[in-house]
Image: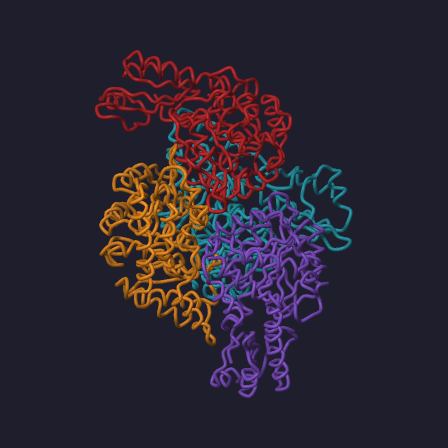
Chain colours: A orange, B purple, C red, D cyan
Amino acid sequence: MRFASDNTSGAAPEIMAAIVKANEGYERSYGADAAMGRVTALVREIFEAPEAVVHLVATGTAANALAIATHVQPWDAVFCHQHAHIAEDECNAPEFYSGAKLVLVPGDHGKITPETLSAALATTGDSGVHGVQRGMLSLTTVTEAGTVYTASEIATLAALAKAKGLPCHLDGARFANALVTGNASPAELTWRAGVDVLSLGGTKNGCLGVEAVILFNPARAWEFELRRKRGGHLSSKNRFLSAQMEAYLTDGLWLRLAARANAMGQRLARGLKDRGATVPDAPANMLFPEWAIGQHERLETAGAHYYRLPAPEGRERARLVASWSTTETDVDRFLDAF
Amino acid sequence: MRFASDNTSGAAPEIMAAIVKANEGYERSYGADAAMGRVTALVREIFEAPEAVVHLVATGTAANALAIATHVQPWDAVFCHQHAHIAEDECNAPEFYSGAKLVLVPGDHGKITPETLSAALATTGDSGVHGVQRGMLSLTTVTEAGTVYTASEIATLAALAKAKGLPCHLDGARFANALVTGNASPAELTWRAGVDVLSLGGTKNGCLGVEAVILFNPARAWEFELRRKRGGHLSSKNRFLSAQMEAYLTDGLWLRLAARANAMGQRLARGLKDRGATVPDAPANMLFPEWAIGQHERLETAGAHYYRLPAPEGRERARLVASWSTTETDVDRFLDAF
Amino acid sequence: MRFASDNTSGAAPEIMAAIVKANEGYERSYGADAAMGRVTALVREIFEAPEAVVHLVATGTAANALAIATHVQPWDAVFCHQHAHIAEDECNAPEFYSGAKLVLVPGDHGKITPETLSAALATTGDSGVHGVQRGMLSLTTVTEAGTVYTASEIATLAALAKAKGLPCHLDGARFANALVTGNASPAELTWRAGVDVLSLGGTKNGCLGVEAVILFNPARAWEFELRRKRGGHLSSKNRFLSAQMEAYLTDGLWLRLAARANAMGQRLARGLKDRGATVPDAPANMLFPEWAIGQHERLETAGAHYYRLPAPEGRERARLVASWSTTETDVDRFLDAF
Amino acid sequence: MRFASDNTSGAAPEIMAAIVKANEGYERSYGADAAMGRVTALVREIFEAPEAVVHLVATGTAANALAIATHVQPWDAVFCHQHAHIAEDECNAPEFYSGAKLVLVPGDHGKITPETLSAALATTGDSGVHGVQRGMLSLTTVTEAGTVYTASEIATLAALAKAKGLPCHLDGARFANALVTGNASPAELTWRAGVDVLSLGGTKNGCLGVEAVILFNPARAWEFELRRKRGGHLSSKNRFLSAQMEAYLTDGLWLRLAARANAMGQRLARGLKDRGATVPDAPANMLFPEWAIGQHERLETAGAHYYRLPAPEGRERARLVASWSTTETDVDRFLDAF
């Protein structure tokens, strides 16, 4: 009954096996390992992007901060949702790496809308040298509210950004979980929709610790490498990052792991609704249910782990996250305790 | 015959076993895992430092940059050897994290001397607000020249720094290799000699990718944590870092691995000397031999990997690094090819 | 009819005379000039702050950015009004100098309220290492909406900050204009109300270009000096800054200049109200009137200079700023053209 | 007898008159003043550079730091003389603004040579992502040793840089003093020799406080403006900077002031040599004489001001700087006291 975060789960057996296998013999360091070439080939095939450049780092914060810094100037604004991970959970890492200012864009259910983005674009960046310049759009899917953007929504937002000349970043710490909720392809959710750079998460979805930064436009690839090294994020034994990512992307493992996590999330959602909880729509593996007071204590006593959130008088709210390793038994025990 | 770097070797079996074992079940994230507590206890015991604070990161550059940034101000000077890794091989990461300036101190055989340090301390930091202030001393052992500092040498240099009020950092990417060359204890080589913060390497000596930053003075421990997160170096599944470091420090594994690497380095040195090469004294696992022209081609043909260095007319120079996984056969084949 | 900004006016005759006089003979550079000592003495007397430390810079952005950077850490949040000059008009200078994040606090009429500040303090800084830490409060008076804070309002807001351990900065680019609107003393509006550091403007109120940063708490005075030099804001011929500030603060010149600017602002406000314009309360020298469509063209034709602002359908809005050099004739010609 | 620095002198009467005159009436702020246009026209004419972009700041450190930051990346190396002002006297401002590392190039008499520069270029920037990249060359004339570069020397050094693709900055805090020592034109000493950006000093040579940054290549002009604002160096009442620079460059005033300073410097040099001092060649206004012990006390008693420098046993060394306002009487009194 561990629903605090998908990062409390371990690594999937296939990933662990790949790590063990990667340990054989000697290998070139700093990203020149053979597996890294295979990772690039896999990404290019899966994303239908034959020129994409791929680099690996060990944390999601590093992936986001480096991806953003590579596309903006220190006097720029990065437009992101007001509750984006880069705004609330990365201790100024994006600002540290880029120098830029985050301009917070409101929106219900964790999502920026064309209206809120247009308003932010209209009121930022037109005061000459005095204010920040418009720099970049950063979206997140799965969002912090557990919702997902459709390919068409991403395309609309990225088009608004592009109309002002801005590139678009997608924080996909849970990209696989978002992807498997719909019928859009990886390409459709990213570069075909106008995404220039993707943080593709592995850690939360069954890896030990690896994130890929995918530069669909290779123009700044060398700059990215320099920024990665300067940030201390170039791994000498990169083979252990490549091995994870290769296994993750091989034969659809990443999709199967995400599908399992989502299925457990939805099973939990249905069960909670059946038991009277209010469960806002969230199609992936992260739920924000609300229920009458008293459950927190009961669930904790039963051994459930999750985050409690502020709630209206007489109510309780929670963040529940299922992972690739969540079992039906876990879910059902939680529901029984409810 | 892979002597390019100890980071081309894989992980020791004990380390890999620990990673596999750490994968069982759920675990708290971001450093709150149980193994992290055990790592701290091990470090405190081994270094006889009951108040030391320990944090893990995945790369040596991150360890150094964060360790330094936590102890200086952006208008400070960090005194280091002119060929220190932080000066030549980290793409400005120490400057990026700290804002400080590296003041390069000369010295033969990769080592700062009391004379060169005194001279640098005397000519930096006394021009009021106009120049940089004196901020920190950073030493490295095993040095970039393969030599090691004795505890007494470190103590002398740290004392010169302390006389000016400066803390001392020790870049110990190959600390274990240095430690096993002498009789000084971990404490004697570090805090008893005046070292305030140590980058303790694991990656090059049989881990997959983990370095410990040991703050012997816990006053800035929270600042370190904030800097680590802001740099994107806080690992969500920290258990996989802790597991490596715990296994590494348990039952002297780190010392056995380093001793094996050093023994292979010394076997190589003896063999090369016997065959007429000039091999500067270097008691650990890294050699910088020089020989008559023609060997590079012969060795390469035989399948040897290593770095070629600039050499005087008619001569050739090399950097050869043995690792925990180097075998006697590797060495002897290299010598045979020579 | 130049109402675009008080920085389009020149220097008051007394200030210019002081500059000319300061030019006699040789003088020590970098702030060691005799006049600088007199400036410090004047500030200490006027602000009843015998330990205050005073440093001069040439621009308001430098004053604010340096004042803030000296009191926060790069992982901190600076709480400021959502339309504060530091947030909208300084091209990321506060972030550049401090590394910190600006947290935008809403509030009508350009003013933070205890409620909005409390809410911001409650939702920022409690997520451990993941989010920014609470760092500082920054207020502005005269505000960007032309309003002023009472001493009691400042004290209430600073107390909320202090309850969380946060220092308080006051952006007083138009501090003199705020001061002369009420009966509070300089001390009452600043350190007695909990202000730790004040940016005291001279440029907009009759100087050529000088701002004083007043550190009521001298603990970080040396750090301020280092930051000023590192930012390129230490003037070698500081005597020309001191001369301005000395003349400005001598015999109440700063108050007379501000009183004149405010009187012209209020004359304009009354005249506009009498002629049917809507003029929000703004007791100093900066007005944001609204009127029926058509005036912009008429006023421009008559030779009036000011900023046009977005307005509701059928209406027009303007920012009008009077300065120490605005005459009754200027005001009356504007009103006649209206 | 004030020979401590040319920045202890005041402003020339023509400059002060221009300031007073610039105070008439209203003027557009932030660099849109009419005089700024005239400054640009003057620079373009004098430097025969019809596309040059000119911006003014109040300090030399700001000019240098902004000029450099606009031309390099944070992972770059800036090659400069080991005793350059940017290396020793700006408290990390160049690093703060640019993020780059200064690589110190040796050379006698304050001058980089083709040999030392070639060596530095050869040993920096070829270690892939691990080390800094080659970014820029920064020269200084008049140098810190009082010497000057010929146009041909500058061209040779800039050509070495350009062969590696690097732009060249010239710190001309005393550019006028250098210019009048030879027959080269402003264009020949700068862009025709390969200089891309010049810090043209006014402050030390008779202005109150103004330096021009001249971008011979306008490609990064807008970036410069953003960096200037972000650094807090955009002056709202820019008219008072323009007025100084306009007067300075009009009718050769800058050259006359520099010629006077140099003449006094040379009179001093001759007098000292005649009296047995050792005076290294230094054709401008800054001398570094050495003499037998005992003079420091005598000169101080006589009222002379200057910097004492470290000297060999039994000897004394001094830095003596003449300025536009130094008189023959000043020099002769100094020599009499000697």
Instruction: Find residue A79 and report its image quarter.
Output: top left
Report the residue that reaches farthest toward the bottom. B336
Q: Which residue is more in the foreground, A27 or A17? A: A17
Left/right of residue D123 with respect to residue C84 in the rendered view: right
Residue C313: x and y, percent?
A: 22, 26
Residue depicted at 46% across the width and 24% down the height: C205
Considering the image in quadrants, where does the C terminus of chain D appear?
top right
Report the residue that reaches farthest toward the front. A336
Q: In the rendered image, is residue D154 in sight?
A: no
Height in image: D106 above or below C77? Answer: below
Residue B90: x and y, percent?
A: 51, 60
Instruction: Find residue D213 and report its image quarter.
Output: top left
Height in image: D293 above or below B90? Answer: above
Height in image: C153 above or below A61? Answer: above
Residue depicted at 60% across the width and 65% down the height: B249
Left/right of residue C81 with respect to residue C56 in the rendered view: left
Instruction: Find residue A176 and report its image quarter.
Output: bottom left
Considering the image in quadrants, where does the N terminus of chain D appear?
top right
Left/right of residue D117 with respect to residue A195 in the rendered view: right
Task: Please count the marks in the image.
Answer: 0
Q: Which residue is more in the foreground, B114 or C159? A: C159
Residue depicted at 62% across the width and 85% down the height: B276
Q: Which residue is more in the foreground, C162 or B271? A: C162
Q: In the rendered image, is residue A116 in sight?
A: yes
Residue C308: x and y, percent?
A: 30, 27
Residue D177: x and y, percent?
A: 54, 46
